Image (cartoon, rainbow, N blue to C red):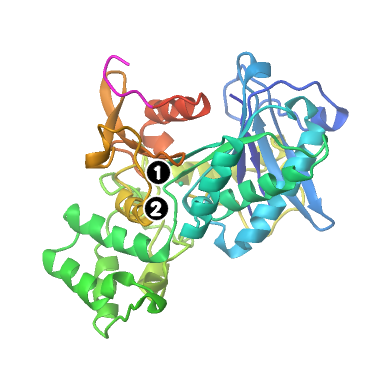
């Protein structure tokens, strides 16, 4: 596949899969050798696309290694952009796509899929219902997976609505979207986080019961919710339980060297309503995770090197602040329990008569091993988990992540047996 990344304060990763005949501007964006990195067998491009007189988004586009002319295009949007404004982010991304296709016209009519994680996937239940309708209308595919919304579904809506009166030059061939570890809905997200922590022995029975009771299961006031004075100290105790582990991957080690750094820590963002009222939430670190828990620190150092930025045609305005990175079923920040509570609110119908009685939940397989669990709904949505992976699924389970993405793009159900 080919991958495109774009950013201002925003990070867009577009996994695109087609070849393009070059314009001079596009060829000027082509990336040669990256300092300290081995040679690669695919072409990639990086640069800026203007979306207004005073704003441009940076992108990084990776072309497919083999037969790119036959492959779809995937736009990846990263999380943690709440402060930019959801609607603005979606509108800028839409404009970016229209201008990017002018620079890479050979991709213009390729099937496009939008993907993203965390806050990129945030949406209210209203948006979910709207896109179930849209999916039925345009034969799109949607998948929630626990690897990622606001601006993913909002961007999809902008494209869908824009296509109704679009000319041939402005039509975008949107086919579906996928969001992983999605921040969906405050009440169900918070309830799911607390239940996940209790079920994984991070908090006690007593704390779990107190939070459920005194915070009224995090219901909004408009829905009859009313938290007591004991809710606040209970929530504070819940947050403190994550002080010494990585909330994004509860079983992974943390990078000990990062704990002694004098540099400011990367803090959690997109906080749910009850949690954001506590300073301890804002002081919690986004701890680097993965098989090497210090990988994120190394990546930050690398992309702040001047020769690397020069090779990527990046930071041409000499920003005063450094690059910093943005953020499975072992993710405590956006756990599968939160996602399931949110989707259950929609009262969807599982596919398959034989599975309806027990909700359609089944295992899916990769290399003859259980890779996670999945349920497919008649309305066009699929929820899948990736076994043993934290928030950043490809770091923990790259082969399972690729299998999940490949089946999504191919319109195929995830394997239902070891022999599939």
Q: Dot 1: what SS?
A: loop
Q: Residue at x 29, y 44 (%)?
A: 252
Q: In whole angstroms, how far apart are the C-alphas of marks 1 and 2? A: 8 Å
Question: Could you tell whether 287 is left or right of 214 in the image?
Answer: right
Quarter the C terminus occupies: top left
Residue 48 magenta: no
Q: Disc 1, disc 2: CB below 8 Å?
A: yes
Q: Dot 2: what SS?
A: helix
Question: Could you tell whether 379 is left or right of 226 in the image?
Answer: right
Question: Could you tell whether 12 is left or right of 105 in the image?
Answer: left
Start and end of the magenta stretch? 414-420
User: Where is mark 1, residue-wise?
Assistant: 294
Instruction: Tally the marks.
Output: 2
Res 347 label = none
Counting from the top left corner in percent of width and height, residue 2 is at 62, 26
Res 258 label = 2
Q: From the viewer's perspective, is residue 67 above or below residue 205?
A: above
Counting from the top left corner in percent of width and height, residue 149 is at 51, 53
- In this orientation, which residue lies closer to the viewer: 258 or 254? 254
């Amino acid at each position: 596949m080919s991958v495109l990344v774009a950013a201002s304060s925003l990070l867009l990763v577009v996994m695109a899969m087609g070849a393009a005949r070059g314009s001079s501007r596009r060829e000027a964006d082509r990336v040669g050798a990256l300092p300290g990195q081995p040679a690669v067998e695919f072409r990639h491009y990086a640069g800026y696309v203007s979306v207004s007189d005073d704003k441009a988004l940076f992108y990084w586009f990776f072309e497919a290694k083999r037969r790119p002319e036959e492959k779809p295009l995937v736009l990846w949007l990263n999380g943690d952009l709440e402060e930019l404004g959801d609607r603005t982010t979606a509108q800028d991304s839409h404009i970016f796509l229209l201008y990017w296709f002018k620079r890479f016209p050979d991709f213009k009519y390729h099937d496009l899929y939008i993907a993203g994680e965390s806050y990129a996937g945030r949406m209210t239940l209203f948006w979910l219902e709207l896109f179930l309708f849209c999916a039925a209308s345009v034969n799109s595919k949607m998948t929630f997976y626990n690897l990622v919304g606001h601006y993913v579904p909002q961007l999809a809506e902008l494209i869908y609505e824009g296509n109704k009166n679009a000319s041939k030059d402005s039509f975008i061939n949107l086919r579906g979207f996928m969001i992983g570890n999605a921040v969906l809905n405050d009440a169900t997200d918070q309830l799911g986080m607390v239940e996940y922590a209790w079920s994984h022995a991070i908090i006690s029975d007593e704390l779990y019961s107190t939070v459920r009771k005194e915070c009224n299961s995090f219901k909004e006031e408009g829905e009859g919710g009313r938290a007591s004075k004991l809710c606040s100290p209970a929530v504070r105790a819940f947050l403190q339980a994550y002080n010494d582990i990585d909330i994004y991957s509860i079983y992974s080690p943390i990078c000990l060297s990062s704990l002694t750094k004098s540099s400011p820590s990367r803090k959690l963002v997109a906080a749910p309503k009850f949690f954001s009222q506590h300073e301890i939430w804002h002081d919690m670190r986004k701890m680097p995770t993965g098989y090497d828990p210090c990988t994120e620190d190394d990546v930050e150092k690398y992309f702040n090197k001047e020769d690397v930025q020069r090779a990527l045609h990046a930071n041409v305005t000499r920003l005063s602040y450094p690059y910093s990175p943005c953020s499975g079923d072992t993710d405590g920040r956006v756990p599968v329990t939160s996602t399931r509570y949110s989707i259950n609110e929609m009262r969807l119908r599982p596919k398959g008569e034989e599975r309806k009685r027990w909700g359609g939940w089944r295992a899916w397989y990769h290399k003859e091993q259980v890779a996670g669990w999945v349920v497919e709904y008649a309305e066009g949505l699929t929820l899948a988990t990736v076994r043993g992976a934290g928030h950043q699924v490809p770091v923990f389970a790259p082969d399972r992540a690729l299998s999940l993405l490949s089946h999504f793009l191919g319109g195929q159900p995830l394997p239902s047996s070891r022999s599939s």
